[in-house]
Image: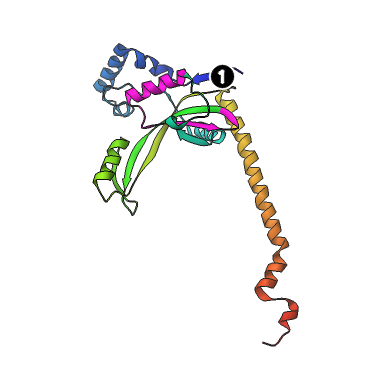
Amino acid sequence: MKTIVETFIVEETQELIYDNEKFDQWNDLVNALGLKGQTKICAPEKSPIPFLPMKRNIENAIATLCPVKVGISDYDKSPIPVEILSLVSLSLKEGHFQKVEIWYDDKMPDPACIGLVGEWICYDRNYSRVAVFFSEIEAQSLKKADTSVYNVSFNPTQKYLIGRWGDVKMNFAALIEKAKELFKAERKNAILTEIKEAQRKLEDLDIDADRQFGTAAASNLPF
């Protein structure tokens, strides 16, 4: 079947990506109005993140259907469409994300490309924060220079859906329903396994009691 590619650019911000005049006008208005919240979604001289912010239900649905998460440079299960690569290239150029990942499942080849915004945190050996950086390079540089830094990890604060592709295109409502059915099936299997294990423990209860306290015949022996 033909591979279908779907990208998720928010319509209101699309023109700010490619139209420098529009972007300058947007920037001027944000600064003039003192919109501090808007300045948080883009770095100075960079366009705002144009992709769809992932709500918790969408993130949970995609994570359920695509449980494997790898950095985009390590993804090797299928060719990444040029439409996705061009948007990733734009994002890296604009400094939108600290990380870009591909989420996928070997059984259902419908990967999703996710952009992550967050912070790189330097910890000491007691896992107390030493410093926080936007850039991994800065965080790793501090680790090399400062012996008190024991570990560096990334804490995502927002995820954006850049695009997805595969044999089947599904709207979000269908995607969520499919994730629900998969979740229920997997949860049901886990619960049935727990029930079987509990039943087996009940069946072995007398044997366990004999091991713990001895048999009735043995209890008649003098101490």
Q: Which corner quadrant holds the N terminus? A: top right
Which amino acid lies under the numbered mark 1 shown in the image of this protein?
Thr
Q: Is residue 5 left or right of residue 119?
A: right
Residue 165's spot in the image, x, y percent?
53, 23
Identified at 32% across, 21% down, the residue is 47
Question: Looking at the image, can residue 134 be seen?
Answer: no
Residue 109, position as x, y percentages in the image: 57, 28
Residue 166, relative to residue 218: is it above or below?
Answer: above
- Residue 98 is covered by the magenta coloring: yes
Residue 152 shows up from this direction: yes
Element at label 1: loop
Q: How many marks?
A: 1
Q: Give the residue displayed 70% in from the left and 72% down from the top.
A: 210
Classify the position of the C terminus by image quarter. Answer: bottom right
The residue pinned by badge 1 equals: 3
Is 117 covered by the magenta stretch?
no
Residues in magenta, as a range: 82-109
Image-quadrant location for residue 167: top right
Q: Nearer the viewer, residue 146 or 122?
A: 146
